[in-house]
Image (cartoon, rainbow, N blue to C red):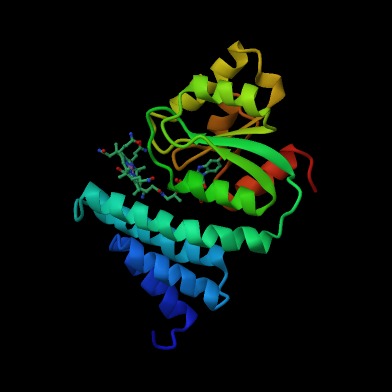
Amino acid sequence: MVNLNKEDLLNRLKEATINGDSDEVARLSKKVIELGIDPLEAVEKALVKGVIELGDKWISGEVFISDIIAAADAMKAGLSILKSEIIKRGKSIKYLGRIVIGTVEGDIHDIGKSIVAALLEASGFEVIDLGIDVPPQKFIEAIRQYNPDVIGMSALMTTTMLKQRETIEAIKQAGLRDRVKIVVGGAPTTEEWAGEIGADGWAPDAISAVELVKRLLNIV
Ligand code: B1M
């Protein structure tokens, strides 16, 4: 590969994400680490940016859902490589706390949730990721099984964000509400929404999600 500067490399990484070329994304993500480029910058300026740009084309009907799925898979191939570097740079040893995170029932969007999970891990938290389409009962079982400090719920659609409220109600019904802090997020959610459903906090992006969790757990 010719001697690439950072901008060229991040651009190529973004294009490979848009093209859904997981092998090329993996190869270029390793290059990011080799060249000592900030892995988080590569996630945000190349991987996520690629998915969003393609998403806009999908919304305007220029590309198909299959293109988005391929781009999301490529993005996650890159995130899995860059995440270890993000964690290494976080140089975390002892866990600051334990978080159970998942995308709510009926919702299979997991790009944002995976970035939040990766950043929380990099910041020294133990993260248990329940994945996508997680019913309220599974969050309840996870509280009993893992005794987390925080429950995090991601939702990407106006229809599924209602499940965040339903899950909080179910946690209350199970008598477990006082045992955990609950944080919600995902594009359609807002600070007001979080207040309305009785969550302990809301964050618009992964960096502020980490700051929020530290605040809620009184970690300076
Ligand atoms: Co879908 N999708 N999608 N989609 N998709 C959206 C979300 C949509 C806005 C596109 C559109 O039509 N305008 C729309 C939702 C509209 C609405 O209700 N508001 C939509 C729809 C309708 C659908 C389908 C119904 C389409 C269909 O089948 N007809 C379908 C639903 C499937 C389902 O969930 N049941 C669907 C499917 C998909 C794919 C599976 C193909 C794919 C997801 C692939 C994957 O995730 N593995 C997909 C994608 C990629 C998108 C877009 C293009 C991108 C979403 C994304 O990943 N954003 C999206 C359009 C868009 O947003 N431009 C769209 C990037 C990500 C980093 O942002 O997740 O917000 P986000 O995460 C941020 C913050 O929100 C925050 O930090 C993250 C990182 O910075 N954050 C948290 C997130 N979670 C948090 C949790 C926290 C704290 C902060 O605490 C725990």
| 133 w.r.t. 111: above or below | above
Q: Is residue 157 left or right of residue 184?
A: left
| 4 w.r.t. 195: above or below | below
Q: Residue at x 70, y 50 (%)?
A: 124
Residue 101, how many percent across, how many down?
Answer: 55, 36
Q: Residue at x 43, y 43 (%)?
A: 110
Quadrant in which the N terminus appears: bottom left
| 218 w.r.t. 27: above or below | above
**For this rendering, which residue is in front, 82 or 110?**
82
Residue 78 location, quadrant: bottom left
Residue 183, how many percent across, how many down?
Answer: 60, 34
Residue 192, how many percent across, how many down?
Answer: 56, 33
Residue 16 location, quadrant: bottom left
Tell me if residue 158 can be seen.
Answer: yes
Q: Residue at x 56, y 51 (%)?
A: 118
Q: Quadrant of ligand 1?
A: top left
Residue at the bottom extreme of this rendering: 3
Q: Which residue is drawn at 30% across and 60% down?
A: 20
Residue 25 location, quadrant: bottom left
Residue 198, how many percent across, how many down?
Answer: 61, 24
